[in-house]
């Protein structure tokens, strides 16, 4: 089975979770080959734009691959976000690398503030995008040709894919795995990583107060606590409505 080649860009100040999250998801995707043996679905390459080493925003030193002129193209390029995206020089460097390889690339994606570099190429003009909710307004103001949907976790518009911050990079990877190899393969990866295959709702839910935990005793262990948790969440959002027991039931 031919592996799909994924390139994840690294640079000083990249958020480790934006890089490692998708890396782990793609690296845990397997399918059976013609001999019945498990075979990796992806060849994942961590790329250095101009050098073979970079340091994440949490101080982790990573070794990277420098692409040569005779290498096969990437099916997918992913630009992770991080504090490094606050540096104009870094943004320009990453944007230049992406633009130079965009024509031969099937899909181009960003995670979190990686959208700053991707948007700086001009390739996203006219497309719907998402990013971390804290950066959505700034992205919309700096790049008025983009259609920013701040509540989405993952958006696909043409060959471009954008994801919200932090763990949404894993959501992006699962989305691409399902697109490439089907939902069953993506679900297997999600189970291995102990994450949801598809999360409910958008980012707006994360800025709300946490709902109280529901504790049940031995005599009520059969209660579906997830269902009750959803009820508590609904009540919190509808405090002005009729909340009599028969209505809640």
Image (tube, rainbow, N blue to C red):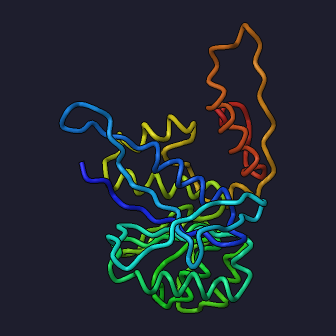
232 up-or-down from 138: above or below: above
Q: Which residue occupies 40% across, 57% down?
A: 176
Query: Where, by quadrant of the figure, is residue 44 drawn?
Result: bottom left
- 60 left or right of 181? right
x 52%, y 75%: residue = 129
Residue 93 picture location, percent across and down: 59, 85
Residue 133 seen in render: no
Question: Which residue lies most toward the top here?
Answer: 219
Q: Quadrant of the C terminus?
A: top right
User: Is residue 240 found left or right of 48 in the rendered image?
Assistant: right
Instruction: List x then y, in percent, for residue 193.
Output: 55, 39
Where does the image place residue 126, in percent across and percent down from the top left?
Answer: 45, 88
Is residue 2 positioned above or below 229 on the image?
below
Q: Residue at x 76, y 47 (%)?
A: 236
Name the residue nearer the viewer: 71 or 58: 71
Q: Is residue 71 visible?
A: yes
Q: Find residue 229 and report its horizontal and vertical position in percent.
A: 69, 35
Give the residue at x 24% y 38%. 33
Depth check: 26 or 2 in front? 2
Q: Tell me if 23 is positioned left or right of 5 in this view.
A: right
Q: Residue furthest left?
A: 34
Q: State the residue in front, 205 or 86.
A: 86
């Amino acid at each position: 089975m031919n592996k799909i080649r994924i390139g994840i860009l690294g640079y000083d100040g990249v958020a480790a979770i934006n890089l490692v999250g998708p890396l782990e998801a793609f690296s845990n995707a397997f399918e059976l080959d013609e001999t019945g043996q498990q075979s990796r679905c992806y060849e994942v390459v961590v790329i250095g734009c101009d050098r073979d080493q970079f340091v994440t925003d949490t101080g982790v030193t990573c070794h990277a691959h420098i692409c040569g002129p005779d290498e096969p193209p990437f099916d997918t390029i992913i630009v992770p976000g991080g504090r490094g995206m606050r540096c104009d020089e870094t943004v320009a460097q990453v944007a230049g690398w992406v633009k130079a390889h965009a024509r031969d690339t099937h899909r181009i994606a960003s995670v979190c503030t990686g959208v700053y570099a991707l948007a700086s190429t001009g390739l996203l003009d006219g497309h719907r995008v998402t990013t971390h909710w804290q950066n959505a307004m700034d992205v919309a103001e700096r790049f008025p040709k983009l259609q920013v949907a701040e509540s989405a976790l993952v958006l696909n518009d043409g060959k471009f894919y954008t994801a919200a911050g932090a763990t949404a990079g894993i959501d992006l990877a699962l989305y691409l795995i399902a697109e490439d190899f089907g939902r069953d393969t993506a679900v297997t990866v999600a189970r291995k990583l102990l994450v949801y295959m598809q999360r409910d709702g958008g980012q707006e839910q994360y800025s709300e107060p946490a709902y109280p935990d529901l504790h049940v005793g031995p005599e009520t262990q059969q209660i579906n606590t997830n269902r009750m948790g959803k009820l508590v969440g609904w009540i919190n959002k509808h405090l002005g409505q009729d909340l009599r027991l028969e209505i809640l039931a």
